[in-house]
Amino acid sequence: MIEARGFPTEYGRGLLADLVDELGTYAVVAHPEPWAIIAPTLRRPPAVVISAGDLTPAHLDRLVAELPAVEAVVGVGGGTAMDSAKWVHGRTGASLFQLPSLPSVNACFTRMTALRDAGGVRYEGDAVPVRVLVDYDLIASAPAELVRGGIGDVLSCHTARFDWRIGADAGRDAPWDDEQAAMSLAYLDELESLSPQLAAGEDDGLRRLMECHRDIGWRCHELGHARFEEGSEHFFAYTFEEVTGRTIMHGELVTMGVLVMAALQGNDPSRPRRIADAARMRTALPDLGVTWDEVEATLHRLPTFVEEQGLWYSSANGLTVDDRVLDLARRALQVS
Ligand SMILES: [Zn+2]
């Protein structure tokens, strides 16, 4: 069991309904589906509801410019809603509350906004919520496969830890830290233990997953980097977004990256496969709406993408994408 540190977090049901009775004027930044579920439960409506949309700085600043004065801002939904709410908090000083509709670390347990800028990802800001509200009913209303996809940003510890070692051995980026790197394995152990509970839709499986995310968010901030959790699997995901001009659910995309990169690393690829299957995640390309050609194009682009973007040194640097590599990736994704 992970003893999580990090942002104050409340678990339960009907949490925002109780909270808004105490809030002053407030704005909501929301995705439409979770908002449609939450809005009827609130006795006091928000002053304004902003649709969570793109994360370009120009768009976010336009949102803030059009916003009435509010005392609080509540992010309701997925990562884009949380990140937009952080931005509003950062620009206006309104108190921040986060109500995630999916389990994810970036959704609510990180301080920075992941801006999409100049074809890449740039992190900015320092937002600390007053409270994160994990509403079991809200999350249960999301498609089950997207909830299960929430393991992706913990599963990433498997390949990230391996990449950290490579980077440290090459004298690049953050120096190796035995204690922090051991936490990568502790998160994976916890994930392996909770995955069947998550697959079964149990509250406790969800709570344990969120506690991993909460501790990971805290650790990233304490360390000043995320090498124990972010490596070539994320770089694969960012490359996929550039190559295809679109994205899929972050955790599912990152998990695809973990499965592929673990195989290329020769790093016990059966373990992430076992965990993803225990969580009953979607990993088959047709189920994800992804073609093998897109994966292949992503792999071909990966080594130059990480150089151009100046990403941490990892197993993606200098990768030669030959038939052997493509065959390993194909097998990791069970493409026949
Ligand atoms: Zn991530």
Image (tube, helix red, strand yellow):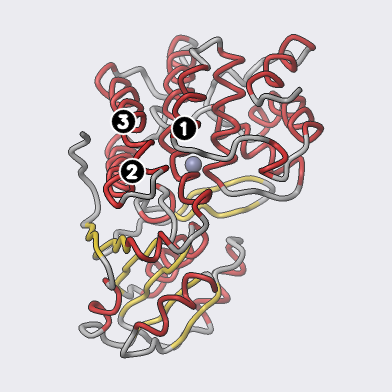
Q: Are marks 2 and 3 in contact (CB under 8 Å)?
A: no
**Which residue is at the front of the view, 37 or 157?**
37
Which residue of the protein is positioned furthest toward the front in this rendering?
A: 200
- State the SS at label 2: helix
The image shows residue 39 at horizontal and vertical percentages of: 42, 82
The residue positioned 50% from the left and 44% from the top of the image is: 149
- Of the two numbered discs 1 and 2 on the same chain, state the one appearing first in sequence: 2
Q: Quadrant of residue 69?
A: bottom left
For this view, does 146 lie left or right of residue 181?
right
- State the SS at label 3: helix
Disc 1: residue Cβ within 8 A of ligand 1's nearest atom: yes
At label 2, which amino acid type do we have?
Leu
Question: Disc 2 or disc 3, which is closer to the eye?
Answer: 3
Disc 2: residue Cβ within 8 A of ligand 1's nearest atom: no
- Of the two numbered discs 2 and 3 on the same chain, state the one appearing first in sequence: 3
At label 3, which amino acid type do we have?
Ser
The residue positioned 54% from the left and 69% from the top of the image is: 52
Marks 1 and 3, how far apart at CA: 21 Å
The image shows residue 319 at horizontal and vertical percentages of: 68, 15
For this view, does 14 lie left or right of residue 139?
left
Determine which residue is flagged by label 2.
209
Determine which residue is flagged by label 1.
230
Query: Above or below — where is 292 with respect to 177?
Result: below
**Which residue is at the front of the view, 294 or 301?**
294
**Which residue is at the front of the view, 118 or 330?**
330
Instruction: Tell me if mark 3 has few (under 14), some (14-19) or many (20+) residues whose alpha carbon lies within 10 angstroms of its own.
Output: some
Instruction: Tell me if mark 2 has few (under 14), some (14-19) or many (20+) residues whose alpha carbon lies within 10 angstroms of its own.
Output: many
For residue 193, the mark is 3
For this view, does 47 lie left or right of residue 187?
right
The image shows residue 121 at horizontal and vertical percentages of: 58, 46
On the rendered image, what quadrant is the N terminus found in? Answer: top left
